[in-house]
Each structure stands twice: as C-alpha cells, then as structure tokens.
Amino acid sequence: MLKQRTLTALVLAPIGVAIILFLPTAVLASVLGVLSLLALWEWARLAGLSSRPLRGAILAVNAGLLVLLWQLRGQDAAWWVIGAGLAWWLLALAWMRNLAWGAAPTRENALIKLAAGELAILPAWLALIEIHGGADRGHAWALLALMLTWMADTAAYFAGKRFGTTKLAPRISPNKTRAGAWGALAGAALLALAGGWLLGQRGVALAALVALGLLIVVASIVGDLFESLLKRQANVKDSGVLIPGHGGLLDRFDSLFAALPVFAAGKALLDLAFGP
C-alpha cells in the first residue's frame, strides 16, 4: 500500500503544483470546484444519503452556490463565509468529544452531517480562492498553504510509524499517534520557516508565520479525525476509491478542508499586522 500511495503521490503532486502556480485563479476555481463537488458527493454518502438522484441534486445546488461564492470573492461577505467554516471546525471538536452523537442512521442525522459537509467544503474552496487571487504572490502563498498540510500528513505518517506508541484518538482513528502529531508539527514548522523566508518574511513576521503553520497542523488533524469519525459511523474504510492507494477525495482532502480557512484568516491578519 505504501508503494502504491507513493507512486500516486509522485504522479499527482507535480500536477497539483503546476495547477496552483500556473493557472489563473478563475481556471483554478473551476478545477477545485469540480473536486469539491466530488468530495461533497462522498461526504453525502458517508452522511447516509444513499440515493444517487438526491446526491446529484445536492451537487447541482452546490454548483450554483460555488458560482455565487465566486461573485463574493474579495468582498467582506467572503470572509463571513470563511468565518463560518472556522466556526464549524470548532463545533466539530465538541462533536468528537461525544462520539455517539449523530451516529444513528436517521434522516435528521443525515441532514446534520450534510450541513456539516457544506460548512467544511464551501468555505475551504473560497479560502483557497482568496489566497490564490491575492495581489502579492497569491499563487505562491496558496502553494505554501497546501504544502504545509501535505508536509504535516507526510511527517505524521513517518514519525508515527517510527516512534508511535501512544494513540492520539484511539476511539476515532486507532492508527494516529501522538508521535505522529509531534512529527507533523515539526515538519510544518520547518516548511513554514523555509517558505516564509523565500516569500520575503523576516523577524517577527516570519515567527508569526511559523506559529500559523503550527495552527494549520492542529486544524488539519481535526479535519482528518472528523472524517475518520464519519467513516466509523458509516462503517466504511475509505470515503471512495477515486485515488489509487489513498481512497476517495475526502481521504486526501479532509485535512485541507479544515486547514485552508485557518490559513486564509491567519494570512489576512498577518497582512494587517506586517503588510503583504
């Protein structure tokens, strides 16, 4: 499985980097919009919505919502949407303290989980668009946001495999360890330090960016754990089979959905404090 995961990553990573660095924001928004809708399709299935026509209708509505959100980019209203995403992940923390909540396969619980998916996916899409469309090296900042999450996932895997003994959240995801979390923090801190330096950050601004990188790791772990909770309640191993060796889109993007609103908000605060 590690070999297959590695080969898939080696193929997809350069494509992802090229898309972020070289595509205009409008084209990127379209590409990410399709991926977000596919992720929402998987989320709806995990929520308990088994009807394909119903999930198709949900995707059609959300395609319209993405068009509406595109019109809001760069406006104050966009930050209200991103703020709603941040608020949702705080609620997710409370949800994960009561693992049985929402587990029953009722219509009400399915709708609650679907609403959670909306609050997880749409603000993350808008957050990346806001970062990417920024006037000052937005493409590079967007790539850093993604790479911080990828680094956290990779460092967590290898640190957990080598040093992991104490489980991080055994009732939700038995494979995640505290050593993996520390490895993710260390890897993201080093990447934030190097990336921030290359992007011209110095002194206090660079230290603040490293702190933001650590916060990104915490958010990414929350996103990862919550998707694991959804899969556990749905009694499935993966959210889908779209990506060889990795499962579905949610299995790869769950961390990003939580991390991107945090990075967008943190970057905006850093710009206010230190300038772009």
Image: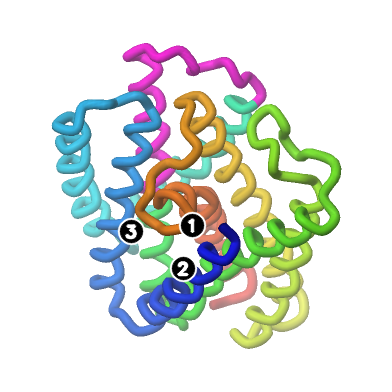
Residue at the spot of label 3? 75
Q: Which mark is residue 8?
A: 2
Q: In this view, does 5 lie above or below 103?
A: below
Q: For the point 44% across and 78% down, which residue is it?
A: 17
Q: In this view, does 253 lie above or below 11?
A: above
Q: Where is residue 244 in the image (x, y as percent from the top left)?
A: 42, 58
Sequence-first disc among 1 and 2: 2
Q: For the point 35% across and 84% down, which residue is it?
A: 22
Q: In this view, does 263 lie to the left or right of 31?
A: right
Q: In this view, does 158 lie to the left or right of 262?
A: right
Q: Residues within 10 Å of mark 2 (few under 14, many from 20)?
A: some
Rendering quarter of residue 205: bottom right
For label 2, the SS is: helix
- Quadrant where the image shows the C terminus: bottom right
Magenta residue span: 97-123
Q: In this view, does 62 lie above or below 3?
A: above
243 or 123, which lies in front?
A: 243
Q: How crowded is mark 3: few (under 14 residues within 10 Å), some or many (20 or more)?
A: few
Q: Position of residue 242 (x, y in %)?
A: 35, 53
- Quadrant where the image shows the N terminus: bottom right
Amino acid type indicated by mark 2: Thr
Q: Residue 245 carries which label?
A: 1
